[in-house]
Amino acid sequence: MDIQEYFSLVFSDYTLRTITLGTAILGAICGMLGSFAVLRKQSLLGDAISHAALPGIALAFMITGTKDTNLLLLGALVSGLIGTFWIRGMITKTHLKSDTALGLVLSLFFGFGMLLLTFIQKQPNANQAGLDKYLFGQAATLVEKDVTLMAIVTGMCLIIMLLFWKEFKILLFDADYTKTLGFNTRFIDILITFFIVLAIVLGLQTVGVVLMSAMLLAPAAAARQWTNKLSVMIFLAAIFGAFSGVFGTAISASQNNLSTGPVIVLVAAVFVFISFIFSPGRGILFKQIRFWQNRRDLKLQKTLQFMFDIAKGHEDISHPHAIKILNNFQGYTKGSLKKMEEKNWVEVEGQKWSLTHDGYTVAKNLYTQE
Amino acid sequence: MEEKIAIRVDDLTVAYNYKPVLWDIDLTIPEGVLMAIVGPNGAGKSTLIKSILGIIDPIAGSVSIYDKPYVKQRKLVAYVPQKGSVDWDFPTTALDVVMMGTYGKLGWIKRPGQKEKKAALEALEKVGMLPFKNRQISQLSGGQQQRVFLARALVQNAAIYFMDEPFQGVDATTEIAIINILKELRKAGKTVVVVHHDLQTVPEYFDWVTFLNVKKIATGPVKDIFNDDNLTKTYGINYKVAVNQ
């Protein structure tokens, strides 16, 4: 199946439609909540939480003996939340830096989870096969029930976000100040964190423990490049996330069933790459172009200033001077003289130049304007 | 006229780990003064403001604003944090930041409307930042960012203002603009408390001063207590005061 075939099938084929819808919704909610994580400088929190969810999955299986997705994800949710509270506790109680706390919880929980997984695999129980899909995710196992759950959580998250928009925004920008205004910052904080944990847990089945944090961060990082408005950023992040999901699924389904999670993450990375280079305000390309333009303009202005200094000594400012005097001056080239002529700053006649009235006024106001 | 007490701090003690940062601070600040808190680095100046405002939990002590506990009087109090305490690359505009000053009175969930926007624009005008209202905040200079923070506090229309080093890293023009606004606030009967670093300007800017170095050294009118003796007690070295020159 090639990509074209995929897109013709996506609306008619039930399985394909379910999976695509699932990854799109997942991408959208992750992009939305990822924006919060990125702006709070908690980018690594997602990584820690997703790894912390692994032992929950294993334990849920050991206790119940079934592979019901909802039960396993409930286990993941509980252990993800425990991980989160450990991180918060460590930071507030021990004065460890947050990166240390995140790293500790991540490796501790992940190590424990892997231990449990290998233990389960040694058991003579045919049911255990397939638990390791939570490591790297397997979008193909998505069924309608999973997608419905994702849609409900995304809807809830959207409502909460719209309801508490003002509170979320001010907490993200200035938490201390928010507290002095009388808002319960702990409540807002827990609300945001809870939804981030929820989004991560929902994504485990599709993208897996290891790559989940990229789903949160990549769309948000890409979106930040294109806008200076929080609402637009979150909207764009959701769009980027959703498109990563759809394209990732399309590519993986059309290329002999490549693992979906990694492909989605790579597509998201392409969004980031493009945004870093081509976004008009913050992108590397336009920054460089602006830098060159500025340098060129400055060079011209330098020459103009020099001419101004010469011309203002004369009664008639348009008194012609030899081009030769400019030779000792670094900013001068034939090209720049021509450009200045185009701007009507100077007039060139033979081997002489003279400042025009326009040029004089521009030069005079060059460094006085705000 | 009977003198009202705007802020009363009793036995306030704050510690990080086992090290006391503020030790048994008693402070009464009368209404309508423009007060500087001075002291060396690590003296707990910012901590004092933050624990009065409930951002830091003290080990002991209480704070009352106009004779009622602070938590009941939040709407009377505005705060200007240190400029460096937030990420100025946050995706928002100057006007939007100033609007945040109205959030407290709005309370949960309710969105700011035209009335709030008008108040924010007025505050921006007062600090001379109206032309920059739609500017992304990272594209403002340090002084402009400080003015935006000041406008955000002005929009709260409070009775008491706490400011954490509002003159840090701003140029002379901005410093004068800010101090003029503070003096206007005092004229309107507001109480202003400022963490301040530049001892030279204390007598010129302020009428009340608190010397702090973990413990409170002295508090009172500048003309009575701003002297060599208190400066030496606070900073530990013999301080030549500019005023005496």
Image (cartoon, coloured by chain):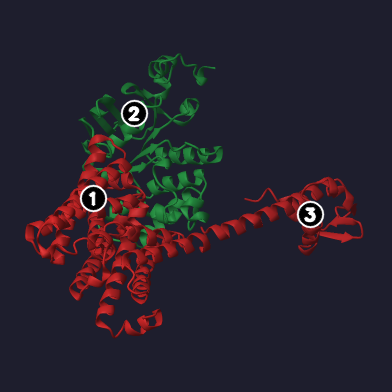
Does B50 appear above or below B201? below
Q: Which chain is green?
A: B
Q: Chain of mark 1?
A: A
Between B79 and A70, which is closer to the camera in this rendering? A70
Q: Are marks 1 and 3 in contact (CB under 8 Å)?
A: no
The residue beneath circle 2 is B44
The residue beneath circle 3 is A360
> Residue B2's x, y, as percent?
29, 31
Which corner quadrant holds the N terminus of chain A?
bottom left
Q: Report the Cα–Cα distance between label 3 and label 2.
A: 56 Å
Between A233 and A10, which is closer to the camera in this rendering? A10
Q: Secondary structure at mark 2?
A: loop
> Residue A348's x, y, as percent?
87, 60
- Label disc, if present, on residue A110 of the rendered structure: 1
Q: Secondary structure at mark 3?
A: helix
- Crowding near pointer 1: few (<14 within 10 Å), some, many (20+)? many
